Image (cartoon, rainbow, N blue to C red):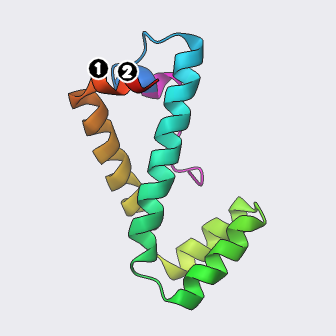
Amino acid sequence: MFQIVILDDKFLINVGLGHLSTDEKKQALEDVKTALEARVGVKLTQSLSDDQVNQFNDILSNDNLNIATEWMENNIPNYREVVMQELDAIVDQIKHNNLAFIKRL
């Protein structure tokens, strides 16, 4: 997520999912990425005006992560903290409910 978080095999090992098959790992990483983006998006947009949300969505639609990162640094100075807080919450959920997460795959 904007070069803050690296979701890879090391991440899966750290949360107790290193034993998954290659296909399951791919799906697990995609699920974590999707959940993280959704949770961070909800948190961040709560502090933005409608104009800022529209402006940011326009930037995201152009797939330019450098511009998106710069925009967030200027408009949401604590966005990195929000990303890490939400990632920590997801990691806790996976660690405490590992079996349920695996069954979803």
- Circle 2 packing at 10 Å, graded few (<14), some (14-19), many (20+), is few
**Magenta stretch: dominant SS?**
loop
Residue type, mark 2 in image: Lys
The magenta stretch spans which residues? 1-11
Q: Check residue 31 in the rendering and tell me which mark sits there, or answer none.
A: none
Taking the image as shown, residue 48 lies to the left or right of residue 54, namely left
Q: Which residue is mark 1?
A: 99
Q: Which residue is mark 2?
A: 103
- Circle 1 packing at 10 Å, graded few (<14), some (14-19), many (20+), is few
Q: Position of residue 101 (x, y in %)?
A: 35, 27
Mark 1 in CB contact with mark 2 (< 8 angstroms): yes
Taking the image as shown, residue 31 lies to the left or right of residue 22, namely left
- Is residue 7 something that shows in the picture? no
Q: Position of residue 11 (x, y in %)?
A: 44, 28
Q: Which residue shows up at 46% across the image and 12% down it?
A: 20
Residue type, mark 1 in image: Leu
